[in-house]
Image (cartoon, rainbow, N blue to C red):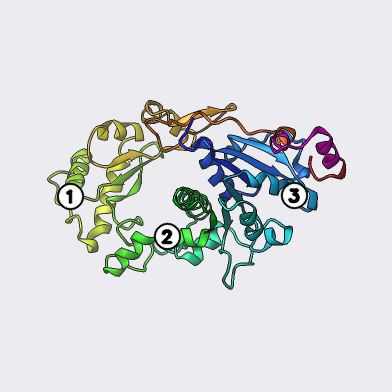
Amino acid sequence: MGPLHGVRVVEIASLAPAPFACMVLSDLGADVLRVDRPTSVGREAAIDPLGRGRRSIGLNLKDPAGVEVLLRLLDTADVLIEGFRPGVTERLGFGPDICLERNRGLVYGRMTGWGQEGPMAQMAGHDINYIAIAGALDPIGRAGERPLPPLNLVGDFGGGGMLLAVGVLAALFERSRSGRGQVVDAAMVDGAALLTSFIHGMRGQGLWQDARGTNLLDGGAPFYDTYETADGLHMSVGALEPQFYAALLRGLGLEGEDLPAQNDQARWPEMRARFTEVFKAKTRDEWTRIFDGTDACVAPVLGLGEAPAHPHATARTGFVDVGGLTQPAPAPRFSRTAAETPAPPVRPGEHTEAALAEIGLSAAEIADLRERGAVA
């Protein structure tokens, strides 16, 4: 049933980070009702892994009657998740003050790029912009080259949706003691900065230089990097500790060879050249067999299509089939309240009538709302 079974979440449909937060909450057992725009209603269910495990209602939030329906849904909800720019929900009539006055226990989750205030709060942006301002983009990339965007994992998902999910869970826990809800202001620029805490700590101790691709964890160290194999694929190497580095050298057949000392940074180019030469001599599968079961911290670099079939993933059921689409399984794992396999995405508006009936609207009232275009 999942540890969040019984928690009712209302999600205002949006893009990427807020849906990811709601996917996490749904995976953990929450009942998530997504509010879709009437223009989306009637479309087929999208092949969208972020939309799994939901129900959907079609509401016109530009119509006061549609907003009133939303407020009635929120009267019995535990959480609202919205991803508008600051001030939009207030203008539409369901800002935090109104909602918390009606339901003092509501956790009001807000997902934005720049936060609810500040000189950039009303500006448009995307993951790459948020992580750039946060200082998270500049360190990523090869020495002498421009910064390389790490997909949209740092801003949208790690620093955005996951941060919002953590904030919501913290607010729900606090509510269990105080009985009161509150606003959770989750900004991707804040979350992306938070993810760099460890690097800031290293920099403050003089262990990190502001020179991209020259440090311990940014590909600068030859023993923390990727290497091409004979078949054009790659292996990952993360042999940081001395004992793991020794295991790496044994696996590469370099034990006893006159190599530079592990932390002799001036001679890292020499070490990298030797590692590159050796890795290139065998295929990825050959290296995988050599390092399997060792503590060398060496693993094959798998493509998205390969990862679900890896023996470790299959042993842990790390990927599941959701409506015919292979997707990562819910995580983390729980000993008593295990999460179920998520339901596939639904058609927008598929549960409109059922959701309206749950808050006490009659068939005639639903028909009136549909006729005026407030629901779909």
Vertical relation: 361 (above or below) 12: above
SS type, badge 1: helix
Residue 28 shows in the view = yes
Residue 12 shows in the view = no
In the rendered structure, find residue 68 and report the number of the disc placed on it: 3
Q: Is residue 75 left or right of residue 17?
A: right
Q: Give the main secondary structure, helix, strand or loop, of the magenta stretch.
A: helix
Q: Amino acid at mark 1?
A: Pro
SS type, badge 3: helix
Q: Tell me which corner region of the image, top left, top right, bottom left or bottom right, holds residue 360.
A: top right
User: Which of the two labelled residues, at mark 1 and mark 3, occupies the earlier sequence position?
Assistant: 3
- Disc 1 to disc 3, how far (Cα)? 63 Å
Q: Tell me which corner region of the image, top left, top right, bottom left or bottom right, holds residue 331.
A: top left
User: Which of the two labelled residues, at mark 2 and mark 1, occupies the earlier sequence position?
Assistant: 2
Instruction: Count residues near mark 1 (Cα–Cα under 10 Å), then give few for <14, some for 14-19, many for 20+.
Output: few
> Residue 365 colored magenta?
yes
Q: Residue at x 75, y 34 (%)?
A: 353
